[in-house]
Amino acid sequence: MIKLGVNSVLFKGYSFREAAEAIKNAGYDGLEISAIKGMCEHLDLDNWKAQKNEIKSVMEEFNLEMLSTEVASLDEERLMKAFEAGAEIGIPIINIGPGGKSDDEESLKASLEKIAKMSEKASEFGVILCVKAHVGASIYNTPTTLKAIDYIKSDNFGIDMDPSHIYRAGELPEEALHKVIHKVRHIHIRDCKGRGPSPGEPKLQTCGRGDINLFGYFKAMVDAKYDGPVCLEVIGPEQDMVSASIIAAESYGYMNACLKILGAR
């Protein structure tokens, strides 16, 4: 069954426990713990051993599944810490961005070589390293995502398919998903107004408030029998607890309704 979660970055102004409680109250199955340096470090990779028991306790208290963590960076030292933390805490998927810049073959090659190397390292810890297409980066659309799939052979490598970045690359995510679904291990999701480059203010990233055909995207998931995590990832200015909770709850209601209509929940 598809598991619905929230990246804790939505609650970056609050403690991990407060974030987890709000995510549980909104109805979610689990969460993605943010380890994004300089933005939100509910998982502090320089201090994860001291956090380990508290994180596990919070997840147990609210009966939430640890679906993933977002590190974002390709920094090798941080990723090795993330792999170790993932193995010890029970975080199965480590999400990153591709780095580099768009439409630059040398940049793409460098990114692919680095991701391939780190995917092999991930295998030593039993975790999966997922990369997503990102506006302005070396991997930014379906063709460059397919190049990554073709180049990186590790079983511990996967795609984190984010429809908002694919949409802002000028594609229709509901049509693009089937081309890469065989390698998709995680899905970041949010809506957006217009083709970007920004996804818009946080409230417009709420599922159902933007221009992306997210019902069609969920249908593509269900048709392909995808059964991995789908985590809401909303970025932008810090939200107060009420605003963040509304975004989370409204998005859950939209996604859960889509899946129920599709007979997948």
Image (cartoon, rainbow, N blue to C red):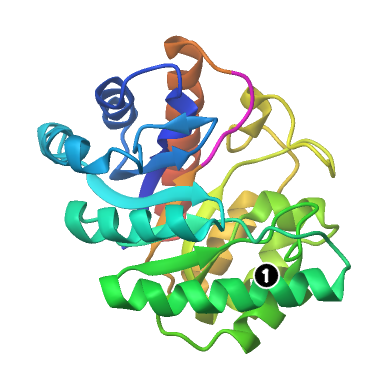
Which secondary structure lies at badge 1? Answer: helix
Q: Is residue 75 visible?
A: yes
Q: Quadrant of residue 204?
A: top right
Residue at 77% from the left image edge and 52% from the top image edge:
135
Residues in magenta? Answer: 233-237
The quadrant the C terminus occupies is bottom left
Where residue 118 sits in the image (x, y, percent)? 48, 72
Q: Badge 1 local density, few (<14 within 10 Å), some, or many (20+)?
A: many
The quadrant the N terminus occupies is bottom left
Q: Is residue 68 a member of the stretch shown in magenta? A: no
Nearest to the observer: residue 207 or residue 198: 198
Q: In the figure, is residue 156 to the left or right of 104?
A: left
Residue at 16% from the left image edge and 32% from the top image edge:
58
Q: In the figure, is residue 124 to the left or right of 10?
A: left
Where residue 147 sits in the image (x, y, percent)? 71, 82
What residue did someone put label 1 on?
Answer: 111
Residue at 35% from the left image edge and 37% from the top image edge:
44
Where residue 256 sits in the image (x, y, percent)? 41, 45
Q: Is residue 37 above or below residue 121?
A: above
| Badge count | 1
Nearest to the observer: residue 135 or residue 234: 135
Residue at 56% from the left image edge and 17% from the top image edge:
238
Where residue 228 sits in the image (x, y, percent)? 38, 64
Q: Is residue 265 visible?
A: no
Identify residue type, mark 1.
Answer: Ser
Q: Main secondary structure of the magenta part?
A: loop
Q: Is residue 9 above or below residue 151?
A: above
